[in-house]
Amino acid sequence: MRIIHSGVPAAGSTLIAVVALAILLFPGRAAAESGYGLDPVLDAAYARASEAARSEGVALSITSGGRTPAEQERLWRDALATYGSPEAARRRVLPPNESTHVGGHAVDVGPPEGAAWLEANGLRWGLCRTFANEWWHFEVATTPGLPCPPMWSDAAVRADRLFVVPW
Ligand SMILES: [Zn+2]
C-alpha cells in the first residue's frame, strides 16, 4: 500500500482520532450529541427495547435522558419553587449530586401506554421502573431476563438509603 502525503487525509485521520478519543473519554457527552446523553449500557438496552416495542406496534419514546448538572440544577430549583420545601421537592426531583439522570443512568419515557409496555417487558433487557410515584422513569436495574427489584416509593427514599454523604 502506498501512503500519499496530503493534508486532507491527514486532517481526516486527525478528526477521526479526536472523535474516537472523545467517545472513549466522554461517552455520555458523545451520546448527548445524538440527543439523550445516556450511559452506553442504558443506551444499548433502551435501543433494543424500543425496537421490540416498535415491532409490536407500541409507541415508546424518550422524554428525558441524560442531563448535565446545570440542567438538573434548573429542574431542582423549579421543583423547590413548585413544591415549597426541599423535602417535598426531593420526592419528585433530586438535586444534581443525587439524580441518576446526571451521568445518563436513567431515562424517562412516554406515552403512558409505552411506559406500561416497558414496565411489563423491560426486564428482558435489564430495564426496570424504579419509583412507584414515577411511571415514566426507568433504569438498568437487573440482569437481563431476571425479575426487577421492588420499586422504591420515591426517589428521595432511595437517595437517602443509597447515597452516603462523606462529610
Ligand atoms: Zn426520571
Image: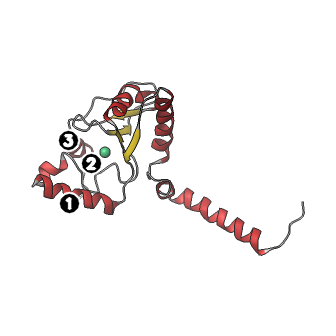
Of the image marks 3 and 1, the number of the one nearer the N terminus: 1
Query: Mark 2 or mark 1, which is nearer to you?
Result: 1
| Residue 9, quarter of picture | bottom right
Judged from the image, the quadrant occupied by ligand 1 is top left
User: Relative to the observer, which residue lies in front, 56 or 107?
Assistant: 56
Whether residue 9 is situated above or below residue 159 in the rendered picture: below
Q: Mark 2 or 1 closer to N-term?
A: 1
| 105 and 115: which is toward the camera | 115
Q: Nearer the viewer, mark 3 or mark 2?
A: 3
Going by the numbered disc 2, the residue's amino acid type is Phe
From the top left corner, tell me how far across and down residue 66 is, in percent. Answer: 39, 52
Residue named by callout 1: 77
State how far apart marks 2 and 1 are (Cα): 21 Å
For residue 163, the mark is: 2
- Label 2: few (<14), some (14–19) or many (≥20) C-alpha neighbours in 10 Å: few
Left or right of 75, for residue 125: right
Q: Is mark 1 within 8 Å of ligand 1?
A: no
The residue positioned farthest toward the bottom in the image shown? 7
Where residue 157 is drawn, which disc sits there?
3
Image coordinates for residue 139, horizontal then vertical, percent: 37, 39
Residue 135 as seen in the image, left or right of residue 65: left
What is the quadrant of residue 95 in the picture? Answer: bottom left
Q: CA distance from mark 3 to mark 1?
A: 19 Å
Q: Tell me which residue sits at (47%, 35%) in the image.
A: 50
Label 3 vs 2, first from the N-terminus: 3
Secondary structure category for the residue under label 2: loop
